[in-house]
Amino acid sequence: MALPLSASAFRAAIKGAGVTVVEVGNWTRHNRNHKGPWGPMRGVMIHHTVTSGTAHSVDLCRRGHATLPGPLCHGVIDKSGRVHLVGYGRANHAGLGDGDVLAAVTAERSPLPADNEADADGNRYFYGFECVNMGDGEDPWPQVQVEAIARAAAGICRAHGWGAESVIGHMEWQPGKIDPRGPIGHRSGPALTMAKIRARVEQLLDDDTPSKPKPPKPPVDLSRLVAAARTDPAKPGAPVSYAGARIVEDALAAEGLLAKKYADGHFGTQTKAAYRAWQRRCGYSGTDADGIPGRDSLAALGRAHGFTVTA
């Protein structure tokens, strides 16, 4: 239990955990405080949006809709792992939930009791993150998004001195809710569970020993990569036109979008298809998701997999 962080401290806690933050409009003053108190804070709640596309999801969570005014959370975590801050203060994200769960989260007791009542005001007590996912049990959660969820939650827990037990899912709070759910990485991947998220949060909170840095990957030259993507179909046995293509292919393979056998340095048909899928994860659609790398989508892939982008 703690007073809410200031907006600047909230932002710093997330950024300090290694997550890219996007500030949307007047997010620091956008809230529902006129409807009731906010705080003291008890924990962090994770949701899925039941939407696709970054721009649409962020706009919906910021504005809300006719029956549920925004903000619908404090941050939207997109499929490329960015956190879009859309509001700060009381937000319409948690609703009424189980008071026994609230008591357990406050005391950091586990396992949580069953959420079989709706007698406590979650909008007052929880920070909320909506994560872009259709919520149909089939839409995959990219690993970079799952890591951003854990890091954002860990940053807030660290700022408050909380443990991983202060992080819960909407499904654990309100009767009848199912979020978050779905496979990790690809449609046949392992299921995302709050137990896995809390385990990663605990690792991040316990990791006070600096790890030995890995040697940096060479930067990827965007113009050379685009040239390879436009002219480099599969060429068995032929020289690779640009070595940076292999760095990008390895990242796409790690995201579960490209079979490892196609990570051969040639930006051919399979690699273009994989990159189109990555662009869609980043919120692009139509002709903007054509498989030809652009700066923003490539930079997002680089942030997730340890390479930088040059012109």
Image: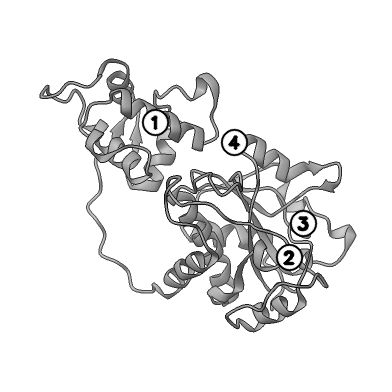
**Residue linked to disc 2:** 174
Classify residue 232 as left or right of residue 78. left
Residue 42, quarter of the rendered image: bottom right
Q: Residue 53: which numbered mark, if any?
A: 4
Q: Secondary structure at mark 1?
A: helix
Identify the residue at horizontal 64%, vertical 58% (top origin).
Answer: 8
Mark 3 or mark 1, which has the lower sequence index?
Answer: 3
Observer-side mark, 2 or 1, equals: 2
Q: Secondary structure at mark 4?
A: loop
Return the residue nearer the eye: 288 or 31.
Answer: 288
Quick one: label 2, few (<14), some, or many (20+) residues within 10 Å? many
Observer-side mark, 4 or 3, equals: 4
Return the residue nearer the eye: 193 or 130.
Answer: 193
Instruction: Please state the horizontal and vertical placement of residue 59, each as a whole percent of the image.
Output: 70, 39
**Residue linked to disc 3:** 91
The residues tagged by marks 3 and 1 sit, at their Cα atoms, a distance apart of: 35 Å
